[in-house]
Every structure is written in structure tokens, then in C-alpha cells.
């Protein structure tokens, strides 16, 4: 934004002085130092109280933006819009385990998970309603062996298993 101002010279004739708050060629903006003390910029520039100066917006650290303000308010920075993302559930190397990937191919989960948990993660990322089946680990008749049951009481595993394997199948946080 450029403004012009008429200033009388010493000889009595009118001259036009160009006041620049924004330098479009260089990208510099006119700033004013408010508050007490001094502000040291790069290249040993010292800015004193109420002094105006030209600088790039990225030269002013965020910590000092309350004492070094632009003379003309800057236009707000562009807000990034969220792009609708597609998510995909892919099988892991181990049968029965899955990973969730975004549209760029980046893996979103840290640990592999069962298919229904992976689909629940995809649904939560896509803002759909999420229903996670609760599974229960119960000890078998023999000591040291366990079975996994779903909400309706149906047995999920075919063979009895140790406690750690049963908890992994149930989706317990410990893996």
C-alpha cells in the first residue's frame, strides 16, 4: 500500500514525498518499535523505542511481535483448507493384522491392529460413527490357557491360547 503526502520544501514549492509502508518489490514491511528498551535485529541493527524501520515479516521473531508492530496491518495469512483424505486398511505381513494408510501412503498407526480396530480407526478419521466391539479374555478350564469372547458371548478363538496372545486378539493396549 503506497500513500503520498504533500510536504513544503524550504523554497516554498510543493513537493510530493512518497511514504512507503509496504515495499512490493522487496517484500519488506514498515514496522514500529513500541514499548521500552531496544530491539536487536540481525546484522547488529539496533531498533530504539518508537523507531520505524523496514524489514521482512520473517525477520521479526514471534516472541517480539507484541513490541514490534506493523504500521499498516498485514493481511491475514492464507488459511490452509483441509482436503478430504482417503484412508485404506492394508494387510500386514503377519496374517490377521492390519495397518491404516492415508492417501499419501503414510502409515497412521504405530502398531499393527486387528481388522475391526483398523476399520474403526478409518471410520473415526472419516468422522463416521464408531462402534468398537468389546472383547473379553476369560481363563479356560485348564490352568494357564485363555479364550476370547465377544459382547454376545461367542467364542472368538478356535484353540485355547496363552494370556498374552488372548489379550492381543481382544485388542488390549498391551502388545
Image: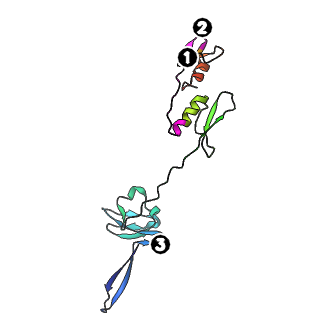
Colour mapping used in the image: rainbow
120 relative to 10, above or below: above
Q: Magenta part of the protein: which range?
A: 123-146
Disc 3 target residue:
24
Write the residue at 59% across / 41% down.
87
Comes first in the chain, label 1 or label 3? 3
Helix, strand or loop status at disc 1? strand
Helix, strand or loop status at disc 2? loop
**Residue 48's quadrant in the figure?**
bottom left
Find the distance from the CA under tag 1 to the CA under tag 3. 68 Å
104 relative to 30, above or below: above
Specify few, some or many for label 1: CA neighbours under 10 Å numbering under 14, 14-19, or 20 or more.
many
Would you say the magenta stretch is mainly helix, strand or loop? Answer: loop
15 relative to 143, above or below: below
Disc 1 target residue:
137
Magenta residue check for 45: no
Comes first in the chain, label 3 or label 2? 3
Q: Which label sits in the foreground, 1 or 3?
A: 1
Specify few, some or many for label 3: CA neighbours under 10 Å numbering under 14, 14-19, or 20 or more.
few
Percent of width and height locating residue 57: 44, 63
Disc 2 target residue:
143
Magenta residue check for 128: yes
Percent of width and height locating residue 172: 54, 24
Amino acid at each position: 500500500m503506497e500513500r503520498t503526502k504533500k510536504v513544503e520544501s524550504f523554497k516554498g514549492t510543493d513537493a510530493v514525498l512518497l511514504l512507503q509502508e509496504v515495499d512490493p518489490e522487496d517484500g519488506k514491511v514498515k514496522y514500529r518499535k513500541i514499548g521500552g528498551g531496544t530491539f536487536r535485529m540481525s546484522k547488529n541493527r539496533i531498533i530504539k523505542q518508537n523507531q520505524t524501520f523496514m524489514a521482512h515479516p520473517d525477520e521479526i521473531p514471534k516472541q517480539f511481535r507484541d513490541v514490534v508492530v506493523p504500521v499498516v496491518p498485514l493481511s491475514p495469512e492464507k488459511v490452509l483448507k483441509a482436503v478430504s483424505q482417503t484412508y485404506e486398511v492394508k494387510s500386514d505381513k503377519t496374517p490377521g493384522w492390519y495397518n491404516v494408510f492415508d492417501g499419501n501412503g503414510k502409515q497412521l498407526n504405530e502398531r499393527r491392529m486387528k481388522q475391526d480396530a483398523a476399520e474403526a480407526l478409518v471410520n473415526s478419521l472419516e468422522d463416521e460413527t464408531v462402534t468398537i466391539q468389546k472383547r473379553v479374555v476369560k481363563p479356560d478350564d485348564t490352568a494357564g490357557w485363555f479364550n476370547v469372547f465377544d459382547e454376545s458371548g461367542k467364542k472368538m478363538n478356535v484353540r485355547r491360547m496363552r494370556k498374552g496372545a488372548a489379550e492381543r486378539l481382544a485388542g488390549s493396549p498391551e502388545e
